[in-house]
Image (tube, helix red, strand yellow):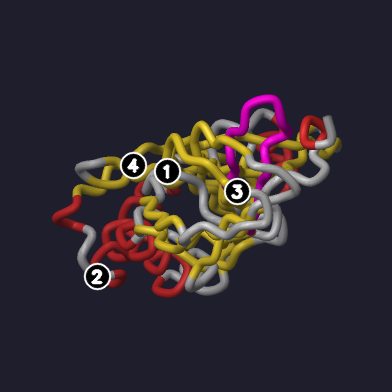
């Protein structure tokens, strides 16, 4: 009866060598299991990748909780009361096409035992997901080479996409109000969705802003063969942004 409400059950602890991982990287560690007050039969050991985020919409803060992945690590074994099992190896590869960690977007690895007629013992570990290799190159092109700086709420995930908001510090400074970017890693490259916002001036600029005439929405695909160095990506994106800027009212 006690184990059915989580008292005296086995305990689990996921031990990782580090807490920061790039998207697409393999996570390795071990799950340590310690028996509780009675013998228990474990049907399976599972791992979940959970994301929590918050974003602002219409002056209201919205909360997002999403399970990105769910895997079975081991199945069918017993845990004796008060005993300790040999550590269970854990190997899990992060998907590459997931949002990255920011101040508003966080990830947890949840590991647990599926035990019949009892509350599942669980362990939750906060991890930081960094951009994968290709996305890191593109982000360096925008942030380091072209000098765009993230706004305070940049990197919010709304349940569908993660949007980064930038303001210019060198390239296009005085011309652009902001640049919004969505990074979507794909097998053959990275798809970027850009919103280029022109800096509004005067009455005409105010009217253009009210009617959203001062912005351009652009989609561009960067093949893997062109994602080699931040400077090369920056050169291509700079030309694209300047061309699209010239089309704005």
Residue 195 or residue 153, whichever sits in front = 153
Quarter residue 193 falls in: top left
| Residue 41 visible in the picture | yes
Residue labelled with disc 2 = 229
- Pointer 3 with pointer 2, Cβ within 8 A: no
Q: Earlier in the sequence, mark 1 or mark 3?
A: 1
Quarter residue 25 falls in: bottom left
C-alpha separation, residue under disc 3 versus residue under disc 2: 55 Å
C-alpha separation, residue under disc 1 versus residue under disc 3: 20 Å
User: Disc 2 on helix, strand or loop?
Assistant: loop
Residue at the image point whose x is 43% and y is 69% from the top: 146
- Structural crowding at the residue carrying mark 4, measured as other residues with C-alpha within 10 Å and reported as few (<14), some (14–19) or many (≥20): some
Residue labelled with disc 4 = 191
- Structural crowding at the residue carrying mark 3, measured as other residues with C-alpha within 10 Å and reported as few (<14), some (14–19) or many (≥20): some
- Pointer 1 with pointer 3, Cβ within 8 A: no
Coordinates of residue 212 in the picture (x, y in percent): 63, 32
Q: In this view, does 116 lie above or below 238?
A: above
Residue labelled with disc 1 = 73
User: Disc 4 on helix, strand or loop?
Assistant: strand
Q: Earlier in the sequence, mark 2 or mark 1?
A: 1
User: Does the magenta-highlighted stretch encompass residue 237?
Assistant: no
């Amino acid at each position: 009866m006690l184990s059915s409400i989580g008292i005296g059950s086995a305990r689990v602890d996921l031990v990782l060598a580090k807490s920061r991982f790039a998207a697409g990287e393999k996570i390795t560690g071990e799950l340590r299991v310690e028996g509780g007050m009675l013998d228990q039969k474990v049907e399976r050991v599972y791992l979940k990748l959970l994301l929590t985020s918050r974003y602002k919409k219409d002056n209201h803060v919205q909360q997002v909780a999403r399970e990105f992945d769910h895997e079975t690590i081991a199945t069918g074994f017993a845990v004796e009361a008060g005993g300790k099992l040999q550590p269970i190896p854990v190997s899990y590869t992060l998907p590459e096409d997931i949002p990255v960690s920011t101040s508003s977007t966080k990830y947890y690895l949840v590991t647990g035992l599926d035990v019949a007629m009892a509350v599942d013992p669980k362990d939750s570990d906060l991890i930081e997901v960094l951009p994968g290799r290709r996305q890191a190159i593109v982000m360096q092109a925008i942030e380091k080479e072209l000098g765009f700086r993230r706004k305070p709420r940049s990197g919010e995930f709304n349940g569908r996409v993660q949007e980064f908001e930038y303001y210019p510090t060198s390239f296009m400074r005085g011309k652009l109000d902001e640049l919004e970017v969505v990074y979507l890693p794909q097998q053959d490259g990275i798809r970027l969705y850009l919103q280029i916002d022109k800096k509004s001036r005067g009455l005409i600029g105010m009217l253009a802003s009210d009617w959203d005439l001062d912005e351009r929405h652009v989609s561009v695909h960067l093949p893997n063969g062109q994602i080699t160095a931040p400077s090369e990506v920056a050169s291509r994106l700079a030309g694209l942004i300047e061309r699209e800027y010239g089309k704005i009212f």
